[in-house]
Amino acid sequence: MDKHLYFGSNLKMYKSIKETVTYLKNLCALTANISRETMTLFILPSFLSLQDASNNIDDRLCHIGAQNMAWAKEGQYTGEVSPKMLQEIGINFAMVGHSERRNIFHETDLEENQKVKMGLSCGMTVLLCVGETKQQKELGVARETIRKQLLIGLHGLNEFNITGKLLIAYEPVWSIGAEGTPASSEYAELMHSEIKSCLEELFGSRGHAIPCLYGGSVNLVNASDLIVQRDIDGLYVGRSAWDADKFNDLIRRTISAYRKFIL
Ligand code: PGA
């Protein structure tokens, strides 16, 4: 089956505004001749870089999104950034529930749910991240954890709210960052098929069609094995994407591995 492929990166709290714009311009130039009919590319820079990024980058080549957002349009929420404010500068894409938000900043599934609902009601595209910790995996509750994150995170939505507007990233917490161990492609597929069946329970066939990306220590070596898995629609890349040349190389090699696989 020929699937549309997704490649994205969260720049976390790295890169200055200037570095972000240079990186994005390079990435767009390098990947410009890859057809966007078969591939979607998105990058999530810091809040402060969003305005310059969106002014300088052609959205048809690369979607620019926020790494987080508030669950209210406005109010007494010191230090927060609302979806309305993001939209004012042309940003219509936001991630919620990254494991660093959940684990370092103690965000709960209920808060992620409020953010998902608020983003979608404002007409934004939302990327919801889910993933179990090392301890949850060792205790044998990885699937239960993911299901809970999806069931609460997507509570109150229906197949019409989400169509074309929701993406899921599965990022096992133990696989993220320099200390992380990448998940094997078999394990990642097992969890992705659990995610797809949970989404199907929630939203029927439209749920099954929600793009699900794998993230956590994706690199040049494991990217091809991951992308050929049935339920993995894309790769969510951290460190291996932060150099435009290397990310371009990873994207091209992954697409060509996938093309060979489906021949
Ligand atoms: P990593 O980051 O690829 O550097 O492990 C993944 C992420 O946090 O999205």
Image (cartoon, grey):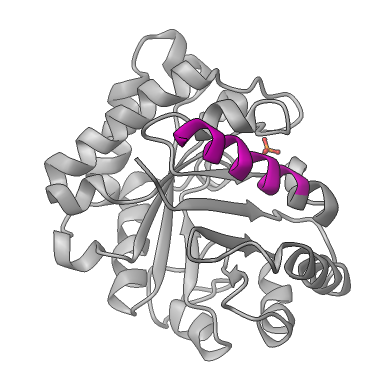
Residue at the far front in the pictured view: 263
Q: Residue furthest bottom?
A: 88
- Report which quarter residue 33 is drawn in: bottom right
Percent x, y for residue 5?
A: 49, 50
Q: Is residue 243 above or below residue 118?
A: above
**Residue at 69%, 47% in the rendered image:** 252
**Image: 150 above or below 210:** above
Considering depth in this image, is 221 or 181 the residue closer to the camera? 221
Q: Residue 15 location in percent, x, y?
A: 83, 61
Residue 133 is left or right of residue 255, and the answer is left
In percent of width and height, residue 107 lies at: 45, 48
Look at the image and say whether residue 134 sits in the magenta stretch. Answer: no
Residue range in magenta is: 249-263
Report the front residue among 34 and 130. 34
Q: Residue 127 placed where, x, y %?
A: 44, 56
Residue at the (60%, 71%) spot, across then down: 64
**What is the quadrant of the N terminus in the image?**
top left
Residue positioned 58% across, 45% down in the render: 236
Q: Is residue 239 left or right of residue 190?
A: right
Which quarter holds ligand 1? top right
* 254 drawn magenta: yes
Magenta residues, dominant SS class: helix
Residue 158 in sight: no
Count of numbered circles in the view? 0
In the picture, measured across the screen, residue 218 lies left or right of residue 121, that is right
Residue 132, picture quadrant? top left
In the image, residue 212 sits, relative to residue 223, either above or below, namely below
From this viewpoint, is residue 192 visible? Answer: yes
